[in-house]
Amino acid sequence: MGLFFEDLQVGQVFPTPARTITEADLVNFAGVSGDYNPIHTDAEFAKDTPFGQRVAHGLLVLAILTGLRLRTGVFEGTLIAWLEIRSYRFLKPVFPGDTIRGETEILEKRETSKPDRGLVVQRVRVYNQLEELVQEGEFVTLVRRRHG
């Protein structure tokens, strides 16, 4: 079981494992999302862009972050729902072959009118293998309380 609302402290930081972005990730995400933009899917087209190569979908990286966060076990069985993603920024491109990792910091906790849950605001960050910050934002979530 993950951490309950009462277990979380403002300022806590939870790192995730790392994961390499693969060719299969780009192809599968394009198929699921329907986003076949050539910046993601056409190597020849992408050569003539400012990036010089294909770029992973920004939302693919965000989706992978959610999976990496799950692997930490921090919110396993205790996260009830996401309410909002705030101020999410895509700061640098992520390329096929890059290895990313995430980090979650507890920013704020608030009790709600329901005794079985609390609101938790988390800053999330994604770094590449060069330790460059590539994405960041805030997740607003409902987390189970231990005694609700």
Image: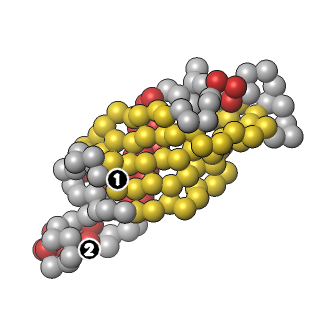
Give the quarter of the figure containing the C terminus: top right
Q: Whole-percent x and y of residue 9?
A: 62, 30
Q: Whole-percent x and y of residue 3?
A: 60, 25
Q: In percent of the image, x 75 and y 40: which residue is there?
A: 110
Q: Whole-percent x and y of residue 40?
A: 27, 66
**Number of residues whose C-alpha sits closer than 10 Å to that of mark 2, classed few (under 14), some (14–19) or many (20 or more):** few
Dot 2 corresponds to which residue? 38
1 or 2: mark nearer the eye: 1
Q: Nearer the viewer, residue 74 or 103?
A: 103
Q: In percent of the image, x 39 and y 42: which residue is there?
A: 102
Q: Whole-percent x and y of residue 118?
A: 74, 37
Question: Looking at the image, how many numbered discs can be counted on the residues?
Answer: 2
Give amino acid for label 1.
Leu
Give the quarter of the figure containing the N terminus: top right
Return the disc, 1 or 2, that comes first in the chain's sequence. Answer: 2
Dot 1 corresponds to which residue? 133
Answer with the quarter of the image where residue 49 lies.
bottom left
Q: In percent of the image, x 45 and y 62: which residue is there?
A: 89
Q: CA distance from mark 1 to mark 2?
A: 25 Å
| Secondary structure category for the residue under label 1 | strand
